[in-house]
Every structure is written in structure tokens, then in C-alpha cells.
Amino acid sequence: MKILIVDDEKRLARTVAKYLEEQGFTTDVCFDGNDALAYTAGTEYDVIVLDVMLPGRDGIAVLKALRGAGNETPVILLTAKDTVADKIRGLDSGADDYLTKPFALAELNARIRVLIRRQGSGTAGNLLVTGDLVLDMKKRVVTIRGEEIRFTAREFSILEFLLLNKGAVLSREKIEKHIWNYDYEGSSNIVDVYIRNLRNKLEKAAPGYGKRIETVRGMGYTIKE
């Protein structure tokens, strides 16, 4: 899953990014409000972690601009202000959650996962399920009939993205933008390569499961029951 971190405290922003990447997320980082809007215009994110005090355009202004443009990506506001009035202002501007600095990275991680679970289709707690296939988003484990299947971090993220959007057709471009960083420049068939690897591992673990990732000609990929 892909997270945008917006904070002008560069050391903090990079620390958060490093931690979240260790937890299996893909991250982009920027340091002012105008850049945040540029990033969100070109890329879809699962969650935006947004500091309130920013140069260029503050976090509340960024949040209002996002919501005004119809962008409903969940937003966690970060701020050193912890008064009730400040929290109400942030939530009334369209924030989904509010975290006061200083904060524990583990708590931020937990709050991000709560917001991602709310978006998922067929999500039960931390679990994404199709048939006997179960993906645990917290433990980052995939099993079929209780047997674990080993995936690379990128393979896991693609399967997670497909399951969160079960039944929807995801284009190659959408998958690439969602799984890789904003500045990624790779081969044109990178998504096809990873999908092939996913299918092969699923098929090897349980015949027929590789075919659950369907190719929709001219459109992309989908996963169904």
C-alpha cells in the first residue's frame, strides 16, 4: 500500500518513511503543501500523513483543496497543537484522523492500517480473503488452506492491492503508480512480470488459484472469488 508523507521536518519525514517501508508500505515524501498537491494530482495513495504547519500552503489548506477537488484519500493530520478546538478544525476540514506530535511510530502504523481496512472490500479485521486464500495485512503473511506461501515484498503488495479492490479491474498503470515510488522509472512490462510470478506461486501452492488473477484484455487485471 502507498503512503504520502508531507512534513517540513525533513528528518522526521524520512524517519517515518523508512519505518513504514520496513512495515511493507511504499512511501513518497515531500516537504511543503504545494508539492503535496502536485504529488496527489499524479498519484493515488491509500493514506496521506499530513502535517498542519507547512510552508507554501498549510496542511488545512491542502486538505480543503483535496476535498474540494473530490479527492477522498484518507488523511491523518500531524500537529504539535493538541487543543480540542484544533482537532475539531482539522476533522471539520475533512481529516479522517488526528495525531499529536510527538507520536509513536507504531501508533501511526496502526492508525494507517485502520484507515486502509475501512476502504477494503471483503475485509475482516486485518484479513483479506478470497476462497481459501487469506492475506494478513498486519503480519504480512499469505496462506491457502493454512499453508503459507512466500512472496517478495513487491509481490505481496500487488496481491494486497488486488484483494483490496476485489472485483475491480486495475490497469497496469494504476498498479505501477500505486506500488512503486513517484519517481520510479522502470521497464514497461514490470507489472506483467510480477503478475506472472504471483500466478506461478499461487498455482504451485494450490492448482487453480493462479487463474483467479484474471487478465482483462486491453484493461488490466482483476481478482475474483
Image (cartoon, rainbow, N blue to C red):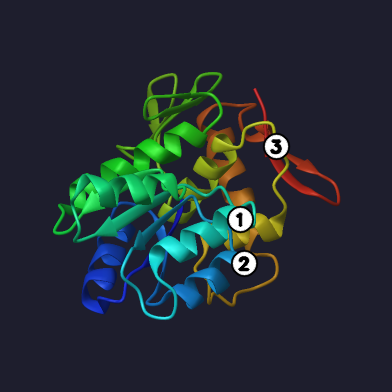
Q: Amino acid at mark 1?
A: Gly
Give the CA separation, mark 2 to mark 1.
Answer: 13 Å
Residue 137 visible in this rendered orientation of the protein: no
The answer to whether residue 120 is above or below residue 73 is: above
Q: Residue at x 52, y 33 (%)?
A: 120
Residue 139's quadrant in the figure? top left
Residue 99 visible in this rendered orientation of the protein: yes
For the residue carrying disc 3, how many other residues have a C-alpha within 10 Å: few (<14), some (14-19), or many (20+)? some
| Residue 41: image tag | 2
Residue 125's quadrant in the figure? top left
Out of 177 and 47, give the one closest to the viewer.
Answer: 47
Q: Nearer the viewer, mark 2 or mark 1?
A: 1
What kind of element bears circle 2? helix
Residue 184's quadrant in the figure? bottom right
Judging by the rendered image, the residue that carries numbered circle 1 is 68
The answer to whether residue 58 is above or below residue 55 is: above
Out of 51 and 92, give the one closest to the viewer.
Answer: 92
Q: Nearer the viewer, mark 3 or mark 1?
A: 1
* Image coordinates for residue 191, horizontal then vertical, percent: 64, 58
Q: Nearer the viewer, mark 3 or mark 2?
A: 2
Q: Earlier in the sequence, mark 3 or mark 2?
A: 2
Horizontal arrangement in the rendering, residue 174 relative to residue 148 (left or right): right
Judging by the rendered image, the residue that carries numbered circle 3 is 168
Give the CA separation, mark 3 to mark 1.
Answer: 26 Å
* Image coordinates for residue 161, horizontal then vertical, percent: 54, 44
Horizontal arrangement in the rendering, residue 68 relative to residue 149 (left or right): right
